[in-house]
Image (spheres, rainbow, N blue to C red):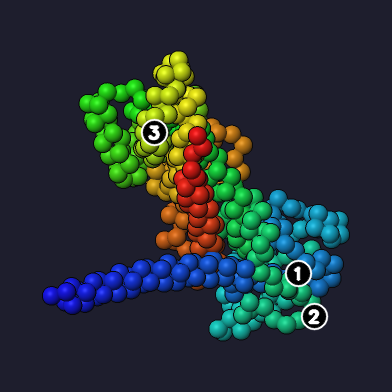
Amino acid sequence: MRKIRKFLEKIIEGILTLSGAATTLVIILISIFLFKEGFGLFNSPVVEKGYMICLNSDNPVQQLSSFEIKEIFDEEITNWKEVGGIDEEIHTFRFEELFEKYSEADFGEDYKLLPDKIIEIVKSDPNIIAFMPEKYVPKDMSIYTLPYQNFSITDFFFGKEWMPTATPTPQFGILPLILGTLLVSLTAILIALPLGLGVAIYLSELAGKRTRKFLKPVIELLAGIPSVVYGFFGLVVLVPIVQNWLNLPVGETAFTGSLLLAIMALPTIITVAEDSMRNTPRAVREASLALGATQWQTIYKVIIPYAKSGISAAVVLGIGRAIGETMAVLMVTGNAAIMPTSLFQPIRSIPATIAAELGEAPAGGAHYQSLFLLGCILFVITLIISISAEVISKRHPQN
């Protein structure tokens, strides 16, 4: 009988070991896949795949950045002097304009004469910049094609525009997304922390046993409500309130998102902080009261300092909940990928961007890879937050 029991224990131990190893392996493989797909962006050309930027060979400009090309075709840059060329007006030309300039017959059978027409267009205008399909661009002395460039780390991390569908050069600057995420998350914590700490103090030190037994499960139940339900609540209730009370043109703002995230982070902050306060030894409380301290003096001079590691962990976990939130933020912040200058304007967060755009991004393309790279950044941020919470929660309070 004892041998059978030991044999079963060995089997169970082996199953648990294999389970842990398999889980670890899956997490490692997912992480490798995430980073592999994400960093593939830096091997993607800045100009849309299969197309080229053509200049007249007499044009002295030999290099243009992704942002400069985009600004030229958006007519924000209108003079070659602004990009290191001569003082002449820039003339942009797109492939579809060929069919407005020439008839179908001019291109010949199976478009055999189309390359000749491209030569004719580019050769006739020294100030032209043309966006053409690579397969139709002929090798000719009158045409200079800009050298291939890949997206750079600087463009990605410090770019101020997120326009993944722009042509001829999409823009993948994540600075507005990072700032929007941090703005809405940190503001949410500033709102939720005093409220959560107040409720935690009440439950731990002031509430009666019956009240605590009722409120504690209700607060913990709030953490289980799906984020899309919170999103509907924010869209129907918070958005009109913020818009009307603050007299804003729209209610979908960073401030609305912060209010909603504060509500969502409260259960985490309250639960962790309250558990930490209740773990304060009874002897510490009694010693403080015996020395003549009032109950409030005991709370803010003894219990809160004793439980500061748990409270800090609650704050860090609350930040992690706020930063990683997707659907609720997507529904109430306006989804505008612009540099935030105020709490009362629409913003877009990293998780909301991934959720909104991943289904539309062609697999393996630059847009697809940029979203995976956003996932890598979110992964690193949440990893840092989780490690910080673990380190803080393991600190032993000092008597």
Mark 1: amino acid: Leu
> Which numbered disc flags the more N-terminal residue, 1 or 3?
1
Q: Is residue 135 left or right of residue 64?
A: left
The residue sitting at 41% across, 72% down in the picture is: 25
Q: Which residue is tagged 2?
A: 141
The CA span between labels 2 and 1 is 11 Å
The CA span between labels 2 and 3 is 85 Å
Across and down, in percent, residue 226 comes to: 31, 45
Between 148 and 57, the residue placed more toward the observer is 148
Question: Counting other residues with Cα less than 10 Å from the Cα at mark 1, is it few (<14), some (14-19), or many (20 or more)?
Answer: many
Mark 2: amino acid: Met
> Which of the two discs, 2 and 3, sits closer to the camera?
3
The CA span between labels 1 and 3 is 77 Å
Location of residue 231 by image quarter? top left
Q: Is residue 5 left or right of residue 184?
A: left
Mark 3: amino acid: Pro
Between 314 and 82, the residue placed more toward the observer is 314
> Which numbered disc flags the more N-terminal residue, 2 or 1?
1
> Which numbered disc flags the more N-terminal residue, 2 or 3?
2
Location of residue 154 with respect to 316 vertically, above or below: below
The residue sitting at 33% across, 28% down in the picture is: 203
Is label 1 in a helix, a strand or a loop?
strand
Total marks in image: 3
Question: Counting other residues with Cα less than 10 Å from the Cα at mark 3, is it few (<14), some (14-19), or many (20 or more)?
Answer: few
**Residue 55 image label:** 1
Q: Which residue is tagged 3?
A: 281
Location of residue 50 with respect to 276 vertically, above or below: below
Q: Is residue 108 visible?
A: no
The residue sitting at 76% across, 69% down in the picture is: 55
